[in-house]
Image: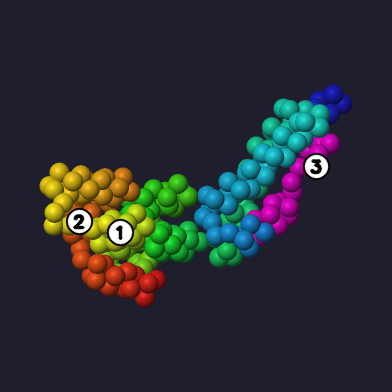
Amino acid sequence: MGILSSVMDKTVPPSFTCPPPQRSTLREAALAHLARFGTTRQGLEQVLLRRVARWAQKAQRAGDCAESVAEHAAGLHSVVSAVVEDMVRLGAVDDAVFARSRVRRLVRSGRSARAVQAHLAAKGVAPQVRGEALDMAVGTLSAAEQELCAALVLSRKRRLGPFATEPATEDEDDATGTARRNRALGVLARAGFARDVAQRVLEMQHEEAEEWMDRLRAES
């Protein structure tokens, strides 16, 4: 009898003062999150795992056995994975669609390809998917043209180059002009833009810069 009781104790789920989330609960939470936010497979998994973690903390504060709570929470990880897979099969989560949408938004906000890559990587988007998104996200613009447009967007935000509020004058001495240019190059470099892209932007006339901005708006 003692052996049978021991086996049953391992197979029957423990009762908790604070009920743990069920698969149906996690599925509803996933759908609610996706109704409000675009996310990746990894992003949704993190959202649901945080929900499990909050339950575990609440259960322990309520006095439930910490070891039992931790064991049950670990078991819920596979349930979370199954719910995420359900959302992928439904098409509610699609890393490629997310990546293309996010690339368009980030390019329009002045983010370099390097910064976009880092952002998508942090979201759990695979390298190949990131590359494809950068190649085809903004209309017919090539990857190099997207990078130029993004650098121009940042330059407009920071009032650099063709968008400078105080353009260089003929009587400006070489030291002042060099310092101004170096500061602008530094801003673009820290944002992840290559030196040749930064130089092209800073040497561009205002009219040409506006033409590129118009094309970015049209392609987006």
Q: On the rendered image, what quadrant is the N terminus found in?
A: top right
Label 1 sits on a secondary structure element that is loop
Relative to the observer, which residue lies in front, 91 or 97? 97
Helix, strand, or loop for circle 3? Answer: loop
Give residue 121's position: percent from left, percent from top: 42, 48
Q: Position of residue 61 (x, y in %)?
A: 77, 31
Task: Tell which tag, 3 or 2, sits nearer the viewer.
Answer: 2
- For mark 3, what is the residue? 19
**Does 141 sit above or below residue 17?**
below
Q: Residue at x 39, y 63 (%)?
A: 108
**In the drawing, does residue 91 fall left or right of residue 167?**
right
Position of residue 25 in the picture relative to residue 217 (left or right):
right
Which is more N-terminal, label 2 or label 3? 3
Q: Distance between the residues labelled 3 and 1?
A: 61 Å
| Viewer-closest of 92 and 2 | 92
Residue highlighted by disc 1: 165
